[in-house]
């Protein structure tokens, strides 16, 4: 018997991806905001020992599409691409999500309605009578709490049984003479909810409304966003200092044991240097500098994400992007870019207009990603302390990146990508209490350790290569010293130096390794594992102005190779890819020059 295909449909932000992950064991990104699933995702689920293919369809509000993700969802349903369909609805707001289920039922007979978030609905005093809905609609209606995996097996079993049986007739939707399908679906949804839904305390709705007014108001929205980000950065900076120093001492201690062991085995000095000063030194520096801030920052940021705060950030920034003749949805892709710029570029698919999508793609590299945050945080701690000043400067760094995103968007919209901003719908999801334990575990495993593993995977071979560059040829100046010396005049002119420019060039594979490669560029012996970051930079002649120039160039330079390849894939053009690299780099060098001149005038 062939494996059945079951489509997982529903509005954005109803828990589809959570259901999908729970059913398949996969780890598709989930969060309390719209726009995460921008393409079809498939996985294998098991129903009574039998494998079925489960397809997570992008969220849609209607089968009459107005966006790219809704086009994919509508095509998947109307073309009958699945043997059965599970339509996930929000049990806390059934009136909003039931109309799509009715549209799907009008086109396909094999439908199971999954009323999700019943645990949250119960906490709000809302009760959904699924049996009444099932009798009224003539299809299975089952309740779930996907975050705790309750009820998922029953829903999958019902869908698999429908997929195996004969196809029932689609739902007959009674419509008035001048009534559209959407109007009929909303009218019927309201009538069904009056019969099957009880609760929805008015006081709770009013409190949530007042909170939204506070967080998205013209007067306090942006200042509150700055204060909240400042608190996150302050906790990160204060908490990362001690474990980072502890890791450095631990790696230094281990390096001593490894060096003595290799010497006792009679290993040649060149091999010891290659393994310890090259591979081990760079890798240990990456771990000691990156791991502590990531282990604090990512869980805090994920808590804000699960709480439902990111859509409020997008709402606050919408007017800014509209003023730059860009799409307000670009604010959501910026939020994705804080995790990974390649993901942010892919997420630009949620923008319907090709012109506005290109603007978002070309400017996403300005957003500081996972790989850049740890180095920026470390430099702020070294040169400005780990207290309120550094936290305020970190908020300033994020604000500067947003301003540059707006500036570049405006520049593009007035030159090569002229046009007017388009209208769109942005849903503000309800605030949800995050599952703190799961959030911390997920952020540590899916973000911190994954980014760290990627950095280590890139750092080890790069450490080997740069050590060889620093020691070849065996006589005369090394290749690395020649490269650093060649770039030194340009580096000094822009407030940097040759080693920093070398670190950025050789760090093209991943932003995480730029700072360790820069440190190795200061001497053929490289950076010994566990060596303190501050003394190493000060001995290399760094000043606070140098650190600020490094931070600015970290924000404004060519994206990493993964992001560049993603831009090529999304745009289909190496020309747009080249512009995405050249535009921020040019502005980055200009701002570094301004900082050098300003610093020289003040000091």
Image: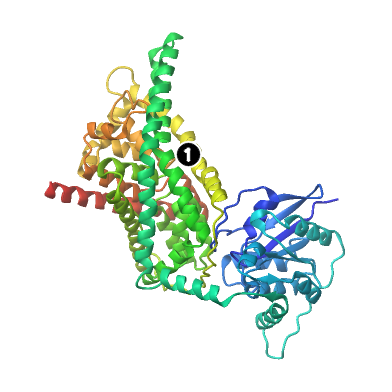
Q: Is residue 206 positioned above or below 416 on the image? A: below
Q: Residue, x 41% and y 30% (percent of image)?
A: 284
Please identify the quarter of the rendering in which residue 287 is found: top left
Q: Secondary structure at mark 1?
A: helix
Q: Is residue 384 positioned above or below 264 on the image? A: below
Closest to the observer: 257 or 27? 257
The answer to whether residue 360 is seen in the rendering is yes
Question: Which residue has dot 1 on it?
Answer: 452
Q: How many marks?
A: 1
Q: Residue, x 48% and y 45% (percent of image)?
A: 562
Closest to the observer: 505 or 14? 14
Q: Position of residue 300 (x, y in %)?
A: 46, 51
In this picture, residue 461 sits left or right of residue 47: left
In this picture, residue 306 sits left or right of residue 583: right
Q: Residue, x 35% and y 38% (percent of image)?
A: 515
Closest to the observer: 220 or 100? 220
Count neighbours of disc 1 (C-alpha within 10 A) and say few if under 14, some if 14 to 19, many if 20 or more.
many
Q: Position of residue 166 (x, y in %)?
A: 87, 64
Please identify the quarter of the rendering in which residue 184 is found: bottom right
Q: Position of residue 512 (x, y in %)?
A: 41, 40
* Residue at the bottom extreme of this rendering: 177
């Amino acid at each position: 018997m062939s494996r059945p295909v079951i489509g997982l449909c529903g509005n954005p932000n109803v828990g589809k991806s959570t259901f999908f992950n729970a059913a398949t064991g996969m780890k598709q990104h989930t969060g309390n905001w719209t726009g995460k699933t921008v393409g079809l995702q498939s996985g294998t689920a098991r129903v009574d020992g039998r494998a079925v293919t489960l397809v997570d369809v992008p969220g849609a509000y209607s089968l009459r599409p107005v966006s790219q993700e809704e086009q994919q969802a509508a095509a998947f349903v109307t073309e009958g691409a699945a043997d059965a369909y599970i339509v996930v609805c929000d049990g806390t707001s059934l009136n909003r999500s039931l109309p799509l289920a009715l549209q799907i039922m009008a086109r396909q007979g094999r439908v199971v309605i999954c009323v999700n978030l019943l645990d949250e609905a119960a906490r709000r005093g809302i009760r959904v009578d699924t049996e009444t809905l099932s009798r009224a609609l003539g299809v299975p209606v089952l309740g779930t709490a996907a975050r705790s995996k309750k009820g998922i097996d029953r829903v999958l079993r019902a869908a698999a049984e429908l997929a195996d049986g004969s196809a029932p007739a689609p739902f007959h939707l009674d419509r008035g003479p001048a009534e559209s399908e959407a109007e009929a679906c909303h009218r019927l949804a309201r009538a069904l909810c009056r019969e099957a839904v009880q609760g929805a305390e008015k006081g709770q709705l009013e409190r949530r409304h007042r909170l939204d007014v506070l967080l998205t108001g013209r007067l306090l929205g942006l200042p509150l966003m700055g204060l909240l980000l400042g608190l996150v950065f302050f906790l990160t900076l204060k908490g990362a200092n001690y474990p980072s120093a502890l890791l450095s001492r631990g790696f230094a201690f281990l390096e001593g044991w490894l060096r003595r062991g290799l010497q006792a085995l009679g290993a040649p000095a060149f091999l010891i240097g290659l393994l310890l000063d090259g591979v081990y030194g760079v890798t240990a520096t990456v771990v000691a500098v990156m791991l502590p801030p990531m282990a604090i920052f990512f869980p805090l940021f994920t808590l804000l994400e699960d709480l439902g705060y990111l859509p409020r950030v997008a709402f606050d920034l919408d007017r800014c992007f509209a003023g730059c003749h860009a799409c307000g949805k670009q604010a959501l892709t910026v939020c994705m870019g804080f995790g990974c710029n390649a993901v942010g570029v892919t997420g630009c698919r949620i923008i319907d207009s090709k012109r506005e999508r290109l603007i978002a793609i070309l400017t996403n590299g300005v957003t500081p990603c996972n790989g850049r945050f740890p180095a920026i945080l470390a430099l702020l701690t070294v040169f400005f302390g780990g207290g309120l000043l550094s936290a305020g400067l970190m908020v300033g760094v994020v604000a500067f990146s947003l301003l540059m995103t707006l500036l570049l968007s405006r520049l593009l919209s007035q030159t090569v990508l002229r046009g007017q901003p388009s209208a769109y719908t942005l849903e503000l999801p309800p605030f949800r209490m995050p599952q703190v334990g799961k959030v911390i575990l997920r952020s540590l495993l899916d973000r911190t350790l994954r980014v760290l593993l990627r950095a280590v995977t890139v750092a080890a071979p790069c450490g080997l290569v740069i050590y060889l560059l620093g020691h070849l040829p065996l006589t005369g100046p090394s290749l690395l010293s020649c490269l650093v010396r060649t770039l030194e005049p340009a580096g000094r002119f822009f407030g940097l130096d040759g080693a920093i420019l070398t670190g950025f060039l050789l760090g093209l594979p991943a932003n995480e390794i730029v700072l360790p490669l820069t440190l190795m560029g200061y001497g053929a012996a490289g950076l010994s594992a566990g060596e303190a970051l501050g003394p190493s930079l000060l001995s290399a002649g760094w000043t606070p102005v140098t650190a600020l120039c490094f931070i600015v160039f970290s924000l404004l330079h060519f994206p990493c190779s993964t992001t560049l390849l993603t831009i090529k894939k999304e745009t289909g053009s190496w020309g747009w890819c080249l512009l995405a690299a050249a535009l921020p780099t040019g502005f980055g060098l200009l701002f570094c020059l301004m900082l050098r001149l300003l610093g020289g005038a003040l000091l």
